[in-house]
Amino acid sequence: MTTVPAEPTDVRATAPGKVVVSARAIGSVAYQATLGCYGIVELVPQNLRSRVGRRFGHPPPPDARDGIAVQMDGDRVRVTLHVVVEYGLPIAAVAHNAIQTVYFAVERAFALRPDAVNVHVHGLRFSEHEGERAI
């Protein structure tokens, strides 16, 4: 018969070695968490090639780094989201929901809490029956 300790043990304190998490891995988790947020229509790519192609109607292939910037400085992590929000929803509430969702997802996946999650809203999307248009 096995016994279960009353307090969960902290593996990081007892196990030798080091776990290294890349900015790309954090960006992938943040990307999936952001797309699951109510009111977020899309993430806006931040590189010039993707923005020019998007402007001319040629969306780039989806990439888990588009619209997400992760800055790491030692144990400090900052995540910046560049998003388009659905028109008619309170932008502050959608942004707050995205911040909380990304905090939770990153903390759950990597056991580290970001110092900051910033949301930059680049536009609003009007949903129409014939199609969609972004401003």
Image (cartoon, rainbow, N blue to C red):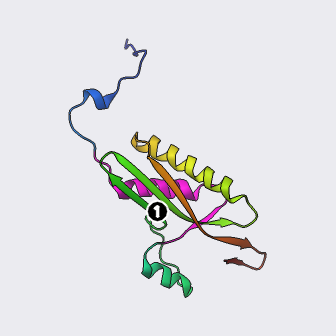
| Corner quadrant of residue 71 | bottom left
Mark 1: amino acid: Ile
Along the line of sight, which residue is nearer the eye, 129 or 19? 19
Residue placed under numbered mark 1 in the picture: 68
Q: Relative to 102, is 49 on the left or the right?
A: left
Residue 61: percent from left, percent from top: 47, 75
- Is 111 situated above or below 25? above
Along the line of sight, which residue is nearer the eye, 120 or 59? 120
- Is 56 situated above or below 116? below
Magenta segment includes 31: yes
Residue 42: percent from left, percent from top: 58, 67
- Is 29 situated above or below 14? below
Q: Relative to 37, is 68 on the left or the right?
A: left
| Corner quadrant of residue 90 | bottom right
Residue at 55% x, 59% y: name it.
119
Residue at 70% x, 76% y: name it.
132
